Amino acid sequence: MPSFGEFASPSRIFRDRDVLSPHFIPNTLYFREHQIRELMSILVPALQGKKPRNLMIYGKTGTGKTCVTKHVAKKFEEEGSSAKILYINCRMYNKPYRILSKAMKSLADGVDKQGYGLSFYYDKMLEWCREGRQLILILDEIDMAKSIDELIYTLTRANDELGKGGVSLIGISNRLTFKDGLDPRSKSSLYERAMIFPPYTASELQKILQQRAEMAFKDNVISAGAINLASAFTAQDSGDARYALKMLSRAAELAEERGLSKISDSEVKEARDVVETDLVKEAVDKLPEHLQLVLYAVARLTLSGSRYARFEEGKDGYLFSGDVYEDYAELCSKLGKQSKTARSYRSYLGDLEMLGLVTTVESGKGIRGHTKLIKLGHTPQETVSMMKQKFGE
DNA sequence: CCTCCACAGGAAGCGCAGGAGT
DNA sequence: ACTCCTGCGCTTCCTGTGGAGG
């Protein structure tokens, strides 16, 4: 009889696996001292009972935005002032009502019942602040929430009503275009201050990975070369630290599965491909149906070698937007689904590009007046087989 | 040169589902 | 449970762009 014990053999590689998780926050954050200091200086008025400025933080994924703010928030709490700082992820709490209720539930007792209206939470918040306390809301992934305008308006109004005490916002977004969708008034309110987090460079990533590797792995299981390789790969295509960590942990798992006692370059190389397809699969799986169908069309046309746009300097391998739409429409009718309009299809393409699943180029001169040329952002085989499974041919 | 084609992407409007208020 | 409202996904309509062809 097998027992669970034999599967849970002590790891030869890992000391603490959690260190590599994207949620882990190390005590020292490298290459973000500047941002940490700036954030602290922005928040310090709150400790003295004054209202800090609102702040907007930008940066691509995996540049340490969330890490830095959480880190600073923790330090802030340790000061033990009457002010309170709350972290809210707008992917989950995506409406003013939800954001406020979430905030108030972690702020005051006796409100964790359902059924209160927005105004109840609003009053509760005023009540809390009226005693001269400062409330700071960190809204992570703020671009995922809707009617932010309304929320910002509500909060600025709250500040007007309050004599002492106040509410401040810290918005975090990875899209620079986020502000375009905002009402001019809320824009100027939210953007009292702004900070930008640049992507990590290869040498920075190297130091970061080194630090995590020391905590995550047992001594001498990973070579400096392997770490360098992982940093170089990452810096080359995104600068996303989460991606680098994922690569590292996959490499370690591979080594462990094979009973190796060291993680070498070859595991890192393999892990890179695995992580790549993992991320693609994850992203594709969550897509709405018609986005998947459009992507499927792109993938299978790429694979079947349909007619490609060929133009100067070897920029071939791009598909014509019109051809992709035709194929998408064909797919739909084959599956007995109603295809969407060409206009919708165009915005789907925009979405897919946002997600990095396809890249598009303006045709420019040489080919058909004004069209987009489309290319898959990854290898087509995976996507095609995945979609075949899902839609059945 | 003008017109047509093939497409991009903004604006407006429509029907729908789901939440708030009664 | 019932309306009323509102945001959302789409469609329709429209204006703009640049090559191809008469």
Image: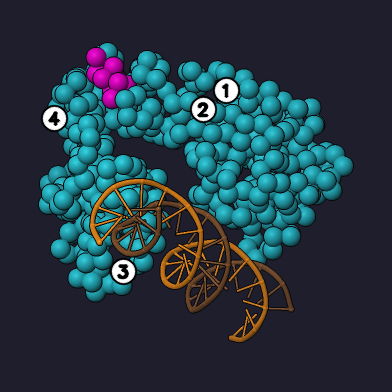
Chain colours: A cyan, B brown, C orange
Q: Which of A111 and A244 lies nearest the eye of the viewer?
A: A244
Residue occupying the point 25% across, 24% down? A13
**Figure disc tally:** 4
**Residue that mark 3 sits on:** A339
Q: Residues within 10 Å of mark 2 (few under 14, many from 20)?
A: some
Amino acid type shown at disc 3 = Ser
Asked if residue A323 is positioned above or below residue A262 in the image, the reply reads below
Callouts 3 and 1 on one subunit: yes
In contact (CB < 8 Å): disc 1 and disc 2: yes
Asked if residue A205 is positioned above or below residue A103 in the image, the reply reads above
- Residue A138 at x, y = what percent? 61, 39
In contact (CB < 8 Å): disc 3 and disc 2: no
- Residue A149 appears in the rendering: yes
Residue occupying the point 39% across, 20% down? A201
Pointer 3 or 1: first along the chain? 1
Pointer 4 or 1: first along the chain? 1
